[in-house]
Amino acid sequence: PSSPYLKGKKLLVTAGPTQEKMDPVRYFTNRSSGKMGYAIAEAAAQQGADVTLISGPTALGAPRGVETIYVTSAQEMYQEVIERFEETDVVIKTAAVADYRPKTVSEQKIKKAEGEWTVTFVRNPDILQELGKRKTHQLLVGFAAETEHLQDFAMQKLEKKQLDMIVANNVAAPDAGFSVDTNRVTFIYKGGASKDLELMSKQKVAEALCEELDILLKSRASK
Ligand code: C5P
């Protein structure tokens, strides 16, 4: 391993979409594949970190060397993350958490009827924002998937959620973002410095992120 400061640290990575139930056969979700988060979990484990992955529903096999916990909804993900936060050194929130869930979940399958169907949604808890409020020693890394004003929106999230770093990716580009195996990201740091990475595999992005984490942990250790 070439990341001495990452070695032995407790990492919590979230990945994938969440599913928000409407009835026993229907749910609301998004196009996240989980690939980016799984790649990060595996890369960090290879650097000797103690990694726990909290995963929404994906088609991926469990990453090697990682404790994987499966959840379905945003509320379940919230529980699993909050429970482990205090003992964690670094949190990387790659998951595309649904911002809204249906206000009511029908116990029986909703039957079709004539005319339109209106579903009311309520806000889910923002997990990362809650971690930002609770953080003591933890490094917090967020992801920002946007289709426009990428840098501005990412910077706003970094500040609002009190993050140390945010990884911005343009999900409108065909070779980056959801589902595909490659990504084109920008690392943005607290204070506003940023670094544009070229197009590369999600594995390579994950390795680059591990190197950045090592540097952040190193500068924290020398404070
Ligand atoms: O949804 P948003 O674009 O604000 O997501 C930015 C970051 O916040 C991501 O890292 C995402 O995992 C996290 N997030 C979260 N809980 C939510 C929504 C987003 O932790 N309910």
Image: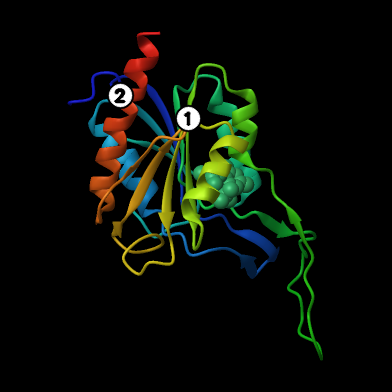
Amino acid marked by disc 1: Gly
Residue located beneath label 1 in the image: 191
The residue drawn where x is 35% and y is 16% is 219
Q: Quadrant of residue 180?
A: bottom left
Q: Nearer the viewer, residue 11 or 150?
A: 150
On the rendered image, what quadrant is the N terminus found in? top left
Indicate which disc, 2 or 1, sits on the residue closer to the N terminus: 1
Give left or right: position of 160 versus 203.
right
The residue drawn where x is 73% and y is 73% is 109
The colour mode here is rainbow
* Ligand 1 contact, mark 2 (Cβ < 8 Å): no
On the rendered image, what quadrant is the C terminus found in? top left
Q: Nearer the viewer, residue 18 or 221?
A: 221
- Observer able to see residue 71: no
Give left or right: position of 133 versus 55.
right
Q: Which mark is residue 215?
A: 2
x and y, in percent, of residue 110 in the image: 76, 75
- Observer able to see residue 222: yes
Q: State the residue lying farthest toward the bottom.
A: 114
Amino acid marked by disc 2: Ile
x and y, in percent, of residue 181 in the image: 28, 60
Report crowding for label 1: few under 14, some 14 to 19, many 20 or more residues within 10 A (C-alpha): few
x and y, in percent, of residue 81 in the image: 56, 34
* Ligand 1 contact, mark 1 (Cβ < 8 Å): no
How far is mark 2 from mark 1, CA to CA?
16 Å
Give left or right: position of 123 versus 98.
right
Circle 2 or circle 1, nearest the eye: 1
For mark 1, give the secondary structure. loop
Q: Nearer the viewer, residue 63 or 36?
A: 36
